Amino acid sequence: MTDTTDLAIETEGMVKVFGTNRAVDGVDLRVPAGTVYGVLGPNGAGKTTAVKMLATLLRPDGGRARVFGKDVVKDADGVRGRVSLTGQYASVDEDLTGTENLVLLGRLLGHSRPAARERSAQLLTAFGLAEAADKQIKNYSGGMRRRIDIAASILNTPDLLFLDEPTTGLDPRSRNQVWDIVRAVVAQGTTVLLTTQYLDEADQLASRIAVIDHGKVIAEGTKGELKASVGSGSVHVRLRDPERRPEAERVLRAALKAAVTLEPDPVALTATVDGHGTDLGAAEQAARALAELAKAGITVDSFGLGQPSLDEVFLALTDRPADGTPPPNPDGKGTTA
Ligand SMILES: Nc1ncnc2c1ncn2[C@@H]1O[C@H](COP(=O)(O)OP(=O)(O)O)[C@@H](O)[C@H]1O
Ligand SMILES: [Mg+2]
């Protein structure tokens, strides 16, 4: 478990100071190889600064950081040979087409022209950009632009890919396309360090998550562990008849011995189940509550059992909600200003 050879990233007390601002303030990370690791935090938390140090673009002011066992300062070249970075910085040329960009970058990476063309075509197809292959990048939509950025960063399959807020400002459909790409990249064996302000994104993609706030890791663990730290799961119930809701509320409160929330939707209720048991325990409790509703003659249209959302986790950890609203600049630049 402590075998460092299975770690893609290992940092101890990593620090970056800008003037008096401790942008990264003693971060310890252990990222297992072959996984998506989520670094979740609001704007200004220190995510990009941490990524830049790990990618050898910024020198740490304190602590240590190793990528696949190589020190990011002492063996920066060794680290660079194994990582690729995409996100809040551009690598493609706006005036070239998709194909031209990828072939050019492939040539710079040492591929022969036919090999570069083949890899380019392969990636453009895989990323749903075949139709746009011969269009200039400046005519791409935000989602297409983000996809070609990722394509450019995996021309040579890197061992570790940094994706810095890959979907900030994208519409839901484009976000889903980027998520599929991330899953495909990981399936090929690449480790991904993903930064995000979106709780659902970390939830969708990452196996472990570090929550970062003001340059510090304030929580770390698997999704389940993080959610369990809030101490409960929740059941969501939708009734056929809104008039029965007050009664349903009483029944659920009695059956679950827990708080029941009335949702804005007049037929919906949410109740917490205590998190001390296993999933089975929570499911059993929920099933018993459902039986009580049936016994009272209250018709339930739909019923769901879930762990608390990562939003609730962030709220529990910091006493304030994470700012999940997209920054105004849709290309993701200047979001830290
Ligand atoms: N080059 C820089 N010079 C001075 N301050 C910076 C620089 N880059 C980032 N910062 C500051 O460091 C903090 C963390 O920024 P950043 O790492 O970009 O956060 P995030 O990526 O989580 O939004 C912010 O307070 C930001 O203003
Ligand atoms: Mg950033």
Image: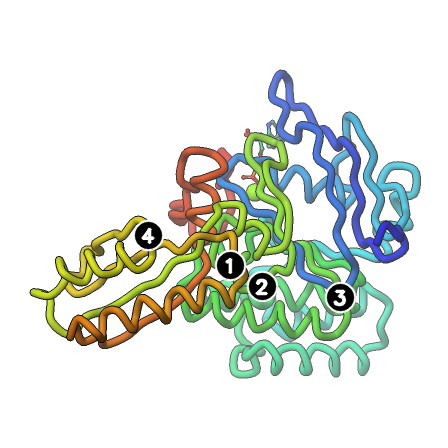
Q: Which residue is mark 4?
A: 257
N-terminal-most mark, 1 or 4: 1
Mark 1 lies on a secondary structure that is: helix
Q: Which residue is mark 1?
A: 201
- What is the count of numbered marks? 4
Quadrant of the snapshot with the N terminus: bottom right
Which quadrant of the frame does ligand 2 lie within? Answer: top right
Mark 4 lies on a secondary structure that is: loop
Given the image, on which type of amino acid does mark 3 rest?
A: Thr
Q: Provide residue 267's location: percent of width, then percent of height.
A: 17, 65
Name the colour scheme.
rainbow
Foreground residue among 146 and 209: 209
Q: Provide residue 26's location: percent of width, then percent of height.
A: 71, 29
User: In the image, is residue 288 above or below residue 129?
Assistant: above
Task: Report the mark closest to the observer, 4 or 2.
Answer: 4
Given the image, on which type of amino acid does mark 1 rest?
A: Glu
Mark 2 lies on a secondary structure that is: helix
Residue 190 — which label? 3
Q: Which residue is mark 2?
A: 205
The answer to which quarter of the image holds residue 189 is bottom right
Inter-mark Cα distance, 3 to 1: 18 Å
Task: Report the mark closest to the observer, 3 or 2.
Answer: 2
N-terminal-most mark, 3 or 2: 3
